[in-house]
């Protein structure tokens, strides 16, 4: 028996401002910090020892994980992987979602946000929001930094990393991943065997731990959001 705990970072500054964030490296709001602290406390109540921690390389996910570890009084090093980053929203990056709904329509925005293989237009490499112009990504080869991504693109990079670096550890160990709405949705698609239509309806709340229990054969035994007041429909179980 082992556990995988997935935590979407607490509310970020651009979550609050209702902007498409993607790979832009923004920090948590005060509410986001409180969400992360609460996440740590309700995970701690389960009494599960975490053997491995993973995060994207983005500040909001790193900060969330550090707050959780502080609650645990656990200073264990964690692995930061760009493959667990949020989806790159291309030319939508930095734009206000409500304003864009008014401009191009709610249906089109929903397609950009939730369709399986539709990519927004590429983000110009001259934009200050492009990852090649953000210090966080200076150690990553420009050849692998995207200009835009679909959910399918995100799924492929997340899943490849999960299978190579994390999946085998779950045979006997407990793992906590602090990541993002779309990178967690990508993992859920794989773990819960969701089809392309189902994944479009899956909501991932900020700062609410999703705990997945595996049996000895690595089959999912149970899963639940720990903060019942803020839980979402998992479409399974």
Image (cartoon, rainbow, N blue to C red):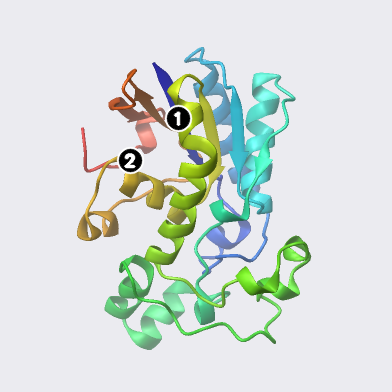
The picture places residue 135, in percent across and down from the top left corner, at 78, 65
Q: Residue at x 74, y 61 (%)?
A: 136
Residue 28 seen: no
From the viewer's perspective, is 183 left or right of 55?
Answer: left
- Around disc 2, counting alpha carbons within 10 Å, would you say few (fewer than 14), some (14 to 19), or many (20 or more)? few
Residue at the far top in the pictured view:
47
Which structural element holds mark 2? Answer: helix
* Occupied quadrant, residue 73: top right
Residue 78 seen: yes
Which structural element holds mark 1? Answer: strand
- Around disc 1, counting alpha carbons within 10 Å, would you say few (fewer than 14), some (14 to 19), or many (20 or more)? many
From the viewer's perspective, is 235 left or right of 82?
Answer: left
From the viewer's perspective, is 122 left or right of 220?
Answer: right
* N-terminal label among 1 and 2: 1
* Occupied quadrant, residue 72: top right
> Residue beneath label 1, please?
4
Give the CA separation, mark 1 to mark 2.
11 Å
Label at residue 191: 2
Q: Residue at x 52, y 83 (%)?
A: 122
């Amino acid at each position: 028996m082992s556990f995988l705990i997935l935590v979407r970072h607490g509310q970020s500054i651009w979550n609050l401002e209702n902007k498409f964030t993607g790979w832009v490296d923004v920090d948590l709001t005060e509410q986001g910090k409180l969400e992360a602290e609460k996440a740590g406390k309700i995970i701690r109540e389960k009494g599960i020892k975490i053997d491995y921690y993973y995060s994207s390389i983005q500040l909001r996910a790193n900060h969330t994980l550090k707050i959780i570890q502080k609650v645990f009084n656990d200073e264990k090093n964690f692995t930061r992987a760009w493959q667990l980053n949020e989806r790159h929203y291309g030319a939508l990056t930095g734009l206000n979602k409500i304003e864009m709904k008014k401009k191009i329509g709610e249906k089109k925005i929903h397609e950009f946000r939730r369709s399986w293989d539709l990519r927004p237009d590429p983000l110009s490499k001259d934009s200050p929001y492009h990852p090649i112009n953000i210090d966080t990504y200076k150690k990553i080869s420009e050849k692998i930094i995207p200009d835009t991504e679909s959910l399918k693109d995100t799924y492929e990079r997340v899943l490849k990393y999960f299978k190579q670096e994390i999946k085998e550890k779950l045979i006997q160990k407990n793992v906590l991943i602090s990541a993002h709405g779309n990178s967690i949705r990508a993992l859920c698609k794989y773990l819960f065997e969701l089809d392309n239509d189902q994944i479009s309806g899956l909501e991932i709340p900020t700062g609410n731990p999703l705990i997945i229990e595996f049996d000895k054969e690595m089959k999912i035994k149970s899963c639940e959001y720990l903060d019942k007041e803020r839980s979402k429909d998992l479409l399974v179980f």
